[in-house]
Image (cartoon, rainbow, N blue to C red):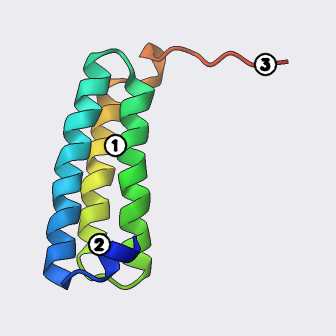
Amino acid sequence: MAQLEKMLPGALKDVEYKLLCQAITEANEWINEGKVSTGYRCLLEGLERAREFAESGEPWAEDLAASYRDALFQVSYLYPRSRRVPMTRIH
């Protein structure tokens, strides 16, 4: 993230929103391959990054985080728990 911090504020915002679009595209690809958890994690990683930017004071980061949350909610809605494969417990 050190390189990103050196960017102009508007450029950083643009990069992060492009990464949001890329994350949504990649998540959809994973989900279409039947890897719902992988797609969800892809979006979750973006949400965590957006939250870090929000905590560091970036004014646009809350909106970015909200966009990631919306995408995560959509995945949860389309693929409810009852349709997911249960995890097996390792003893």
Q: Which residue is mark 3?
A: 90
Residue at image position (36%, 85%) is: 57
Residue at image position (44%, 71%) is: 52
Amino acid on which disc 1 is placed: Leu
Amino acid on which disc 2 is placed: Ala
Residue 47 in percent (x, y) is at 38, 56
Q: Is residue 17 above or below residue 2?
A: above
- Label 1 – label 2 distance at C-alpha: 16 Å
Amino acid on which disc 3 is placed: Ile
Q: Which residue is mark 2?
A: 61
- Label 1 – label 3 distance at C-alpha: 27 Å
In the picture, measured across the screen, residue 38 lies left or right of residue 26, that is right
Instruction: Say which of marks 1 and 3 sits in front.
Output: 3
Mark 1 secondary-structure assignment: helix
Q: Quadrant of residue 89?
A: top right
Q: Quadrant of residue 28?
A: top left
CB under 8 Å between discs 1 and 2: no
For the N terminus, which image quadrant?
A: bottom left
Q: Which residue is mark 1?
A: 72
CB under 8 Å between discs 1 and 3: no
Residue 12 in percent (x, y) is at 21, 74
Instruction: Say which of marks 1 and 2 sits in front.
Output: 2
Q: Earlier in the sequence, mark 3 or mark 2?
A: 2
| Residue found farthest to the right | 91
In the picture, measured across the screen, residue 78 lies left or right of residue 55, that is left
For the C terminus, which image quadrant?
A: top right
Residue at image position (44%, 59%) is: 48
